[in-house]
Amino acid sequence: MLRSLLKSPDGYLPTEPKSYAGISDPAKGGNPDIRSYQPYVLGQCEPPALIPLELHGVGMEVECSLDTAFVTVSGKWRVHCVTASSTCDCQVAIPIGEEGSLLGLEVDGSGKSYHTELISLKDEKDKDKVAKAKDGYFVKSHIYTVKIPQFRGGSVFSIKIRWSQKILFHDGQLSLCVPFSFPSYVNPAGRKISKKEKIFLKVNSGATTEVLCKTTSHPFKELLRQAGKLNLSYEAEVPAWSSTDLSFSYSVSSNDIFGAVLLQSPFLRDFDEREIFCLYLYPGNSPDRKVFKKDVVFVVDISASMKGTPLDNTKNALLTSLSQLSAQDTFNIIAFNGTVYLFSSSMERATEEAILNATTWVDTNFIANGDTNIMLPLTQAMKLLEKSTDSVPLIFLVTDGAVEDERDICNFAKSYVSSGQLVRTPRIYTFGIGLYCNHYFLQMLAQIGRGHYDSAHDLDSIDFRMQRLFSTASSVMVADITIKSLEGLDSLELFPTHIQDISFESPLILSGRYSGTFPELVKVTGTLANKTNFVVGLKVKREKDMQLSNVLSKRHIDQVTAQAWLLKSEELEEKVTKMSIQNKVPSEYTCMNMVLVQSDEGKKTPEQFLLQKAYNKLSFQKLELNNQNLFLGGLSLGFGDLKATAENLPPAIKEAKPPEGLLGRAASNCCGRLADTCCGMCLLQTCTFVNDQCTIVCTQICAALACFELIKCCVELCECDCLQ
C-alpha cells in the first residue's frame, strides 16, 4: 500500500497475523453492502489476487515459561471486498517467531468450523498427500500461510492461532518480540466499529526471586507479582489498530549463577508414566565473572552450492567473529569442499596481524566450487585441538549440504569425546544453511560435542545467527558440568545426553523423565575459568503453575528424532509420533491437518465420527481421513537431500509454497507493482488530456477502485499534486 514497499518484494509480505481474500474471478469483487453492476469484468486472475481483509477485533495472550513463549492470537476479519452473493477462499498469514512451531489453528465463520490436529505419517498414502499439500506452506522462513476455503462476501470469521517461540537471552536479560503491528489499510473503513485491543502477558521464570521488568512496548498494568512470576495486562479502545509489535524484556534478580530443579507428574492420559524433571541454571548478571580462553577452529563449507549470498554472508560473520577474539585466544580456519584448505598448519594467536592475514586468506580462498566432504575437515580440526590445555577448544562447523557418512561422523565424534579428558574435549558448534543439509545430523553432532546448534532457513539471517551462535560459544564461564545425586534414579532419560557448558549468552536447561524418588538437593559441579571448582546445590520443588510437558516437548521431540535418525530406530520414531500427537507439536513423523467439524448448513460432524476420533486419539491409532481435511505441509525439516547436495544446488530456503503460491509472486510481479503505483486521482487528472475512448476506460477503472473503497486510500497516500 505504501510507495516505500515498491523498493523490495519482501515489503509486501505480512509481518503480523493477517487474512486475505483470494479472488480469482474479478466479477466477484465488490462491496458486499452495496449492489453494483459491472458489465465489462472479464478474465481470471492467476494467481488469485490477494486483498487484505478488514480487521474487526484482535487480542493476544503470551505465556513465558523458562526459555519458551506460547503465543495465542485471536482475531476477527470481515470479507469486505467480495459481493454478498459470492464466495472466495481466504489466506491466513501466520508470522511464527524465533525457533517457533505452529501449535494449532481454529477457524469459525460462515457456518463452518475448522480446527487442526496431528496425525501419524506411517501410511505411504498420507506421506504422498502431505508432499502434494497446497493448503499450508511457508512463504518465508517465518511466515506460514493457510488456505481456508469458501467464505461469503460480507461475512465475519474468527481465527485463533497458537504457536511457540524461543525467548532470547542476552546480557542477563530475557527478551521477547511478537508481531502485533497492523497496517492502516486493515482498519474498517466507513463504519464506526469499536476497536478494542487486548494483550495478556504471563511470566513464570521458575525461580524463587523477583522478576524485574526492563522494557515494554505497551502501557501494561500489573495484575500479579510473586516470586518468579509476573502477570501484566493491556487493554485499550483505539482509533486504529496497534502499530507497534509487542516487545518485552525482563530479568530474574541475581548477580550469581542460580537455578533450581522442577518436578511434575505426568498428566492423566500421558503415554509415558514416568515423572518429569527440569533443571535450569542461569548465568546471572555479575560483571566479574571471567570467560574461558578459546582455541577455535572454523570449519566452513565452500562447495559450489555456497556460491553467492550464502558464502558472502558466511564470510562476513566469520570475519566479525575473528575480530571479537582476544589476544590470548588462538584460532585456525579450515575451508572444505571435496578437499581441505588450511589457513595455518597450527593454531595461531589472535593478534591483529594474524587476523589481518586470515582476512586476506579468506578473501583469496573462499571460492565456491567442488562437492562436500565433512569427515576430512572435522578430523583435521580435532587434530589441531589435541594440545589444548587450560582453554576450551571449539569447532565451529558451517555447511549447507548433506553427506552419506553422517552417522560415521557422529560415531567418530562420540568415540573421540569419550577417549579424551573433559576439559580438552572439543566443543562442537554446528550451523546449517537452508533445507538441503541434515539438521538432525547437525543437532546430534553438536549434542555429542557438548555444543549448540543453530540454522538459517533464509539467506539474509546467516550473518546475524552465526554471530549469535559464536557469541554463545565464546562466552563459556563454567565448563565440564556434572550432575550428581541422579545415579539412584530408575529409567532415567536425560536431554541433552551430553551436558553443555554454562555460557553468558545461554542458560543451561536439562530435562527428562525418571522413576523412583528424586533427591531433595541436586549437586552441580564444574570448572570455572580461573581453574577453581564450581559447586552449587539446587533445591528441588514441585511445579504447579507451569506445564512442563508443554514447555519441554519441542526440545524432547527434536532430540529423540535425532536419536531415531542416528540409530535407525523404528521404536524411537513411534515414540516421537506419540510425543508429537500428545503435545500437539509437529514432528518429522506426523502431519498437521485441518478438520471440518461443522458444515455450511450448520450440521455438526456425526457423533459416531467424534467418538471414533476420541478413541483413536487416546489409543494413538490413525484416524481415517476424508476429503474435507486440509493438509498443512512444510512444517518439518526433513533429513537433508543427498541428491541436491551432489548436484550442488543452491541452499533451499524455507519457502515450500506450491506453484500457484500467491504472496511471493504478488510481491515480485511487475504488473502488480505497476498497478500498485497507479493512483485513481492521477487517472482522473490524466483523462483531461486523452481522447473519449481512453477517458471511458480510465473512468471505469476509477469506478472499480471506488467499489473497493480504494479512492480514499489514494487520497491519503498520493504524493503528487493532482489533488490540489
Image: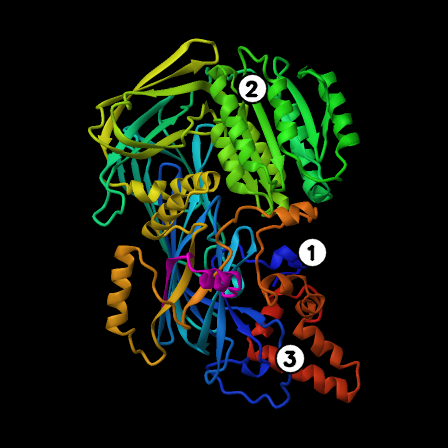
Up-down: is 563 above or below 631? Answer: above
Instruction: For label 3, count other residues whose C-alpha is less than 10 Å away and answer few (under 14), some (14-19) or many (20+).
Output: some
User: Which residue bears the numbered disc 2?
Assistant: 393
Q: Quadrant of residue 324?
A: top right
Tell me if residue 163 is in the magenta stretch. no
What is the three-letter code of the residue carrying label 2?
Pro
What residue is shown at x 60% (from left), y 59% (from top)?
Answer: 12
The image's mark for residue 702 is: 3
Residue 297 in sight: no
Q: Which residue is under mark 1?
A: 7
Mark 3: secondary structure? helix
What distance separates the C-alpha of mark 2 from that of mark 1? 45 Å
Of 378 and 2, nearer the camera is 378
- In the rendered view, would you say 83 is above or below 423? below
Quadrant including the C terminus: bottom right
- Looking at the picture, which amino acid does disc 1 mark? Lys
Q: How is the image coloured?
A: rainbow
Q: Quadrant of residue 537?
A: top left
Query: In the visual, does 344 lie left or right of 211?
Result: right
Give percent across and percent down for residue 575: 35, 46
Q: Position of residue 613 (x, y in %)?
A: 29, 64
Q: Residue at x 35, y 15 (%)?
A: 535
Considering only vertical position in the picture, is 437 above or below 632?
A: above
Give the mark, 2 or 1, whose residue is nearer the N terminus. 1
Q: Is residue 575 above or below residue 58?
A: above
Q: Position of residue 464 (x, y in %)?
A: 59, 37
The span from disc 1 to disc 3 (Cα, nearest Å) is: 25 Å
Q: Which residues are magenta?
A: 114-136
Proximity of marks 1 and 3: CB atoms separated by less than 8 Å: no
